[in-house]
Image: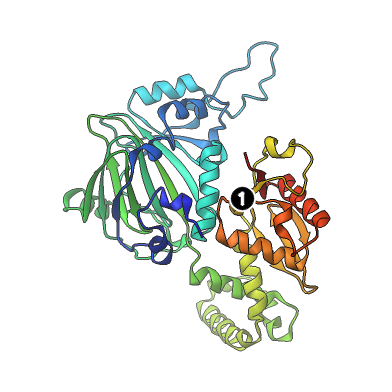
Amino acid sequence: MQLRALSSLVPDPTAFVSAPPDAPVVWEMPAEPLTRLLTLADVDRVVGQNLSSDKLRVVSDGVTAPVSSYLSRAGGAGRSNARSAGSVSPSRVGRLLAKGSTLVLDGLQHVWEPTAELCRRLSFESGCSPVDASAFLTPAGGRGFGYHWDIESVLLVQTSGSKTWHLHTPVRPLPLAHEWEALSDADQERCRTRQPDLAVDLRPGQVLWIPRGWIHGGHTTDRPSLHVSFGFLPFTRYWLAMRVIQAMDERRPEFDTLRHRLPMGIGGRPQELRLAVADVAAALAAALPHVDTDAVAADAALGMRGDLPDAPMHAASLLSATVTADTRVRLVPEHITGLDARPDGRFTLSVGTVAITVGEKAGRWLADRREQATDQPWCAADMAPATDDGAAIRLVGELLTSGAARVAP
C-alpha cells in the first residue's frame, strides 16, 4: 500500500504503522507541504464561513471563554436570525485573539475539506478509528492551555510561526478513554519546576509525535503559532473486551442470568453488592466459552469503520460524460468503508451508508486495487476477464456516483 498521507508527516510511514513510537519524537520534514495544510488565511476563511460555535473554543491560560463572548449577534429588524443562531462572530473572535487568547478549531475535518481528505486517508492508512484534526492559533507570548494529557496519540504539525513544548512522562501509562482526568495541582507544579523529558521549539517543517498519556504544555514566545493536531485514538484490547461483553446479549440460556436486574437499593448494602459482583463474575466466566468469536470479530470490524466520515460529493465525476469501457478513473480507497464477501460468493462494497453489490471476481479485483492503494488510472475494460464490459461499465458508474472512484484528469 502507498502510504501517501503518512509519508507527508513522518519519515518512515511503514515503521510508524507497524510500531508507533511509545515516547515523544520530533521529525524533520520538508516544510513546504506542511505549511500548506492550514494557513492564517485559511483560518480566516473557516471562521468567516458562518462557523458553528461548537466548532470553536477561545482559551487563555487554561480558562475557556464563554461562548457568549464571541457569539454572533447578527439578525436585525425584520430579518430572520435562524442562519446566524449559534454561529461565531469573526470580529468578536478577532478581538479576543488580539488580546492574547488562543483559538481552537475543533473537528477541523468537518469544516475544512482539505483537512477532511487528509484525515480520511490517514484513517485508511493507519487502520485507526477516524483520525480527527484540531487547529490551534496562539498569539505571541501566549499560552492557551496548562499541562495536560490526552487519551489519544497526536501528530502535531507546525504550519506557521513557532511554539515551545515541554513534555513529561505519563502519570497514567496507556490510558483508556474512561480514565481521563485533569492533572492534580501537585502534578502541575511538578511539570512547571522539573526538567522536562523533552523540550522543543517547534517550527514549520517539524512534526511532534505525542503518545497517549504523555503530559505536554506549550507556549509561544516572540512569534505567533499555528499548528494542526491529528488525533489517533487506538483500538485497544479493552475495547475488544467490551465487544465480547456486548455479545452476551444473545438469546442463549448461558447468558440469561446477566439479564436479571439488581435488587433495588443494593448500593446501600455492601455485603449483598459484593456477593452480586462475585456472582456476575462467575456468570461471565461460565458464559465466555459460548461467545461466538467469529460473530464478535465481524461486529468489531463494523464498529471500527462505523464512524468513518462519508465520501464528499465530487461534481466533476458525478456530472461527467457517459461512462464507457475506456473512461479512465481512479479508485479512492479511503472512501471505501468495507468490501465484504457474502455467503453467495458476491461482495458488498460500502461507501458510508451506500452499499453496492459486486460479483465475486469483480469484488476480488477491486479488493486487490484497494489494497494496492495506488493512483494508477484504470477503466472498465481493465476488469476483463473478471467481468464483462457491460457489468464493468455499470460498476464504474456506481463507483463514481458513490464517491468510491473519481474520473482521472
Which of the 4 image quadrants contains residue 341? Answer: bottom right
Quadrant for the C terminus in the image:
top right
Q: Residue at x 56, y 26 (%)?
A: 49
State left or right for residue 298 relative to residue 231. right
Q: Is residue 160 above or below residue 363?
A: above
Percent of width and height locating residue 222: 22, 29
Residue 140 image offset from top left, x and y in percent: 27, 29
Q: Which residue is mark 1?
A: 332
Q: Does residue 148 sit above or below 39 in this rendering?
A: below
Q: In x, y percent, where is residue 218? A: 29, 42
Q: Residues within 10 Å of mark 1 (few under 14, many from 20)?
A: many
Q: Name the residue at the top extreme.
A: 77
Residue 164 appears in the rendering: yes
Return the residue nearer the eye: 407 or 290: 407
What residue do we see at 47% from left, 51% from top? 4
Placement of 317 over or under 47, stated as above or below: below
Residue kind at label 1, given as amino acid type:
Val
Between 93 and 36, which is closer to the camera in this rendering?
36
Residue 260 visible in image: no
Would you identify the image quadrant in which residue 184 lies? bottom left
Tell me the SS state at disc 1. Answer: loop
**Residue reaching furthest to the right:** 390
Horizontal side of residue 296 vs 182, given as left or right:
right
